[in-house]
Image (cartoon, rainbow, N blue to C red):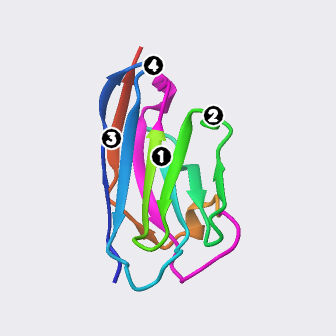
Amino acid sequence: EVQLVESGGGSVQAGVSLRLSCTSSWLTRPYIPMAWFRQAPGKEREWVGGSDSGNNKAYADSVKGRFTLSKDNFKNTLDLQMNSLRPEDTAVYYCAAYSAGERIGVGTRVDDYGHWGQGTQVTVSS
């Protein structure tokens, strides 16, 4: 019923910027909460940042000030501008969407979201 597709990943040097994009096929329900997560090898899937139905945005401490979300609340797209990339940012980045229609408050847990994209690899070399 909803498809999420990530793009924009790649292999870059530390200090470089990347912009990740997530496009959603869910156009019948606006203001769907969406988020970005990442998962490094051998690590748990980690919340990066997200947006709720009230257009509130929040970020993990590890990326705050470096990463910025851009949300289109009617098209249900969520872009992640990643600046000053560090080797520890290396991971597969996943886009996620809430399984219901609307929610106030940014979810930070994997089980807050019911729909996931296939992931896009980001590799940052020192």
- The residue labelled by disc 1 is 38
Q: Residue at x 45, y 74 (%)?
A: 74
- The residue labelled by disc 2 is 65
- The residue labelled by disc 4 is 15
Mark 1 to mark 2: distance in Å? Answer: 17 Å
Mark 2 to mark 4: distance in Å? Answer: 14 Å
Element at label 2: loop
75 or 61: nearer the eye?
75
Circle number at residue 121: 3
Q: Where 126 falls versus 61 (above or below)?
A: above
Element at label 4: loop
Q: Where 56 falls versus 74 (above or below)?
A: above
Element at label 3: strand
Nearer mark to the viewer, of 1 and 2:
2
| Circles 1 and 2 in contact, beta carbons < 8 Å | no
Q: Which residues are magenta?
A: 82-106
Q: Residue at x 59, y 80 (%)?
A: 102
Which comes before the other along the chain, label 2 or label 3? 2
Question: The disc labelled 3 sits on which kind of residue?
Answer: Gln
Which comes before the other along the chain, label 3 or label 4? 4
5 or 87: nearer the eye?
5
| Circles 2 and 3 in contact, beta carbons < 8 Å | no
Q: Residue at x 37, y 80 (%)?
A: 27
The quadrant in which residue 16 appears is top left
